[in-house]
Image: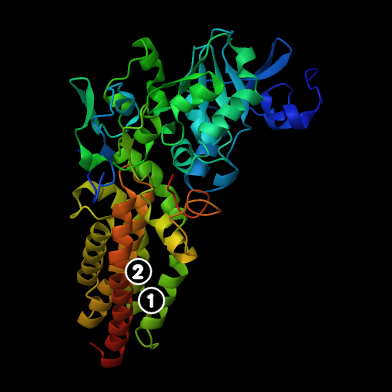
Amino acid sequence: MTLTYMKNGETLSLDGETCIGCGACVDVCPHAVFRIELGKALIASRETCMECGACARNCLVGALSVKAGVGCAGAIIIGKLRGTAPDCGGGSCCDSTSSCC
Amino acid sequence: MSLLLKRDAKAEAQAGFVVLEGLKKSWVKRFMVYGDRTIPVAATSLDKGDRLGGLKARWGVGRMRYSVLPGIYAVGNPTKDSPVFVSANYKLSFDALRSNLAGLDGWILVLDTKGINLWCAAGKGSFGTAELVSRIAKVKLADLVSHRGLILPQLGAPGVSAPEVLKKSGFRVEWGPVRAADIQAWLAAGRVKSAAMSKVTFNFRDRMAVAPVEIAHSWPIIPAALALAAVFALPARGWLARAIPAAILLLGSIPMGTMIFPALLPWLPSRAFVVKGAALGAAWALSCAFIFHIPVLAAVGGILVATPVVAFLAMNFTGASTYTCQPGALLEVDRSFWPMVSSLALGLVAAGASRLFGL
């Protein structure tokens, strides 16, 4: 069963013109969002994208962009309390109180 | 041990040149002399200590100190041609890797992720390009092996840019499978990943593995739940008969939100964790009300309190899940804050009213 969430992959964009179809995105994506067709990558399953940022970071030609971030309510709450961006770091979340991890 | 050389420990400490106190661990089988270096050889099976330590870390005990020294390790009898596997220095991540390398000769390059697990560290960037490039230099990896390849776990990709690593270090990153358990099969298949090897799952086992730490972190709710049950069962006449069901209802919200919720996750209504949790919390409180014949107004109070508590615990589970994105989690937090606070407040009023009016 594939679990789906809300607002998935909304910030993910792929520039088909720039893409060289190397398949790096297919290789690093943990949710099988991409497929190579006719020598180009395409977004086959946007609804499973968790916006981890692996594809954009590893795209050879910069054809991919995504606003990467942790999908962690705890980090978001901590960020709101501190008036910062969502943050697992600095002695919270992954470090001690919750489990982004 | 005669190999215990105490040379310039600071500079060489993490490079595997000297045998450090911090490396005298049960899982370090021996130290191998390799050129002018002394490199710890890690066991490829987990002993009792490893398992107990892993269990404790899962329950949040000493989790932040559960790390290994960054640097280079060996498994088996590696040579200059052996593959280099890269790992995080959270011991559970490191253990997952080495325990799946039985029978192989290889190197393990452990990055300093501050004791954070691999995927989280990659998300934060501590398992990242800069740390990898600098660690390669620190351990003088280019002298250790004749090839220029690195095998990284696929989940390291949010933090590591393979093209940049190649540019800055000359080492070519190859993305291995998501799970260390698939490494041997992946190697046997000629380093080709099957679709399943590159996909993250969140099945029942995965969900229950991350549940204990949620339970461990929900302890502050316990005194609050007990205090509420005690106060709202007042006055003294018939106190116990009211306090016990109330305590069961309120305390039960914790295992509901931390264990039953992850177990039932796929089957609970809605895609929002907070809504799923609210449904579960309401169902739980309603069941308690029926079972214990709780008076109507008190039952309403119980439902209004248990619902946001379970919903909140459920929402926190987004962090443990493997498929949530940030905009979705942000939506949950924004939309649920006032409803949860209001429900909690109304619930307390209803419980108080129930006692005042005897309904």
Q: Which residue is mark 1?
A: B229
Residue B102 visible in the shown view: yes
How far apart are the two marked residues, 1 and 2, measured between alpha carbons? Answer: 7 Å
Q: Which residue is mark 2?
A: B250
Q: In the image, is residue A12 above or below residue B96?
A: below
Label 1 close to label 2 by CB (< 8 Å): yes
Residue B310 visible in the shown view: no
Residue for point 81% across, 25% down = B7
Rendered image quadrant of residue B330: bottom left
In screen coordinates, is B64 left or right of B162? right
Residue for point 40% across, 16% down = B184
* Tags 1 and 2 on a common chain: yes
SS label for mark 2: helix
In the rendered structure, the residue with mark 2 lies on which chain?
B
Q: Viewer-proximal residue, B39 or B66?
A: B39
Rendered image quadrant of residue B91: top right
SS label for mark 1: helix
